[in-house]
Image (cartoon, helix red, strand yellow):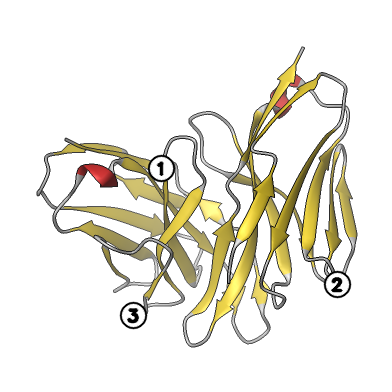
């Protein structure tokens, strides 16, 4: 299978608290794991990604961790702010023989940061 | 450098009508994708292309056709629109190297909102 499952589907946090979103994937050959943020009415935009040769990557208040053995990766947002309110998507590529790579997205997590 | 441009941005169709969505990118990307996003749902892959003259089916290809006659353009066609095709359509492109397995950032267009009555 080529599924990417994402949990939770909604997440409400108090401003300043941390938020964690988890994704699991099924294709053990996947080697690239991006996270996209989509604000209301806007296009998805990449916020952070990780490749399979590292276990963790940080960029200011966001971090992504990868566990290849368990086939899951997580997005961590610390010190959440109201502008972090958005829908977040994880994704994983699947290589299809003679048809190249396709990127499969998780179902999304709607994050609401309450002031 | 406009990135990924989609036209039209909004369209209302009647059931049975046909239309084409155009996606153009100026980043010389090999890979291009068409996704649909329904309310409260994620991004589902319709069709994709790994280079000029090639196309492949995604998760939800039925009712759609695509063409990639030029590297910079990826067209999505609806031959006979149905209400179930009411959605927001996103085009995206990325640099990728099939040989090395490198996968780059996906750049999205602004989306095209299609309503089928």
Q: Horizontal and vertical percent for residue A34?
A: 69, 56
Q: Is residue B105 visible?
A: no
Vertical placement of residue B74 versus A79, above or below: below
Q: Residues within 10 Å of mark 1 (few under 14, many from 20)?
A: many
* Residue B23 at x, y percent in the picture: 35, 56
Which of the two residues, B99 or A102, is positioned nearer the viewer here? A102
Discs 1 and 3 carry the same chain letter: yes
Which residue carries the number 3 mark? B53
**Secondary structure found at label 2:** loop
**Chain letter of the residue beneath label 2 in the structure image:** A
Towards the viewer: A7 or B22: A7
Tell me, yes or no, whether the two marked residues, 2 and 3, touch with CB atoms within 8 Å.
no
Look at the picture and state if B54 lies above or below A32: below
Disc 2: CA contacts within 10 A as few (<14), some (14-19) or many (>=20): few
Q: Does B88 sit above or below residue B104?
A: above
The numbered mark at residue A78 is: none
Query: Residue drawn at (36%, 48%), measured in percent from left and top?
Result: B6
| Residue receiving disc 1 | B111
Left or right placement of residue A78 versus residue A4 in this view: right
Q: Which residue is mark 2?
A: A53
Which of the 4 image quarters holds residue A62? top right
């Amino acid at each position: 299978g080529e599924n990417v499952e994402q949990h939770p589907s909604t997440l409400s946090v108090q401003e300043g608290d941390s938020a964690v979103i988890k994704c699991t994937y099924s294709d053990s050959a996947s080697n690239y794991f991006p996270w996209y943020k989509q604000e209301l009415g806007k296009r998805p935009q990449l916020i952070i990604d990780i490749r399979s040769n590292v276990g963790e990557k940080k960029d200011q208040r966001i971090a992504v961790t990868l566990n290849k053995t368990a086939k899951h990766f997580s997005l961590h947002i610390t010190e959440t702010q109201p502008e972090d309110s958005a829908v977040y998507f994880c994704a994983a590529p699947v290589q299809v023989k003679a048809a190249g790579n396709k990127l499969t997205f998780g179902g999304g997590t709607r994050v609401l940061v309450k002031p | 450098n406009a990135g990924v441009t989609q036209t039209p941005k909004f369209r209302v169709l009647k059931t049975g009508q046909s239309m084409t969505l155009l996606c153009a990118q100026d980043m010389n990307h090999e890979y291009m994708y068409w996704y649909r996003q329904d309310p409260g749902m994620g991004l589902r892959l319709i069709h994709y292309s790994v280079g000029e003259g090639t196309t492949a089916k995604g998760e939800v290809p039925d009712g759609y056709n695509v063409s990639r006659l030029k590297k910079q353009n990826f067209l999505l066609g609806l031959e006979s629109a149905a209400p179930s095709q009411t959605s927001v359509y996103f085009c995206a492109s990325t640099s990728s190297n099939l040989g090395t397995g490198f996968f780059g950032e996906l750049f999205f267009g602004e989306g095209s909102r299609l309503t089928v009555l």
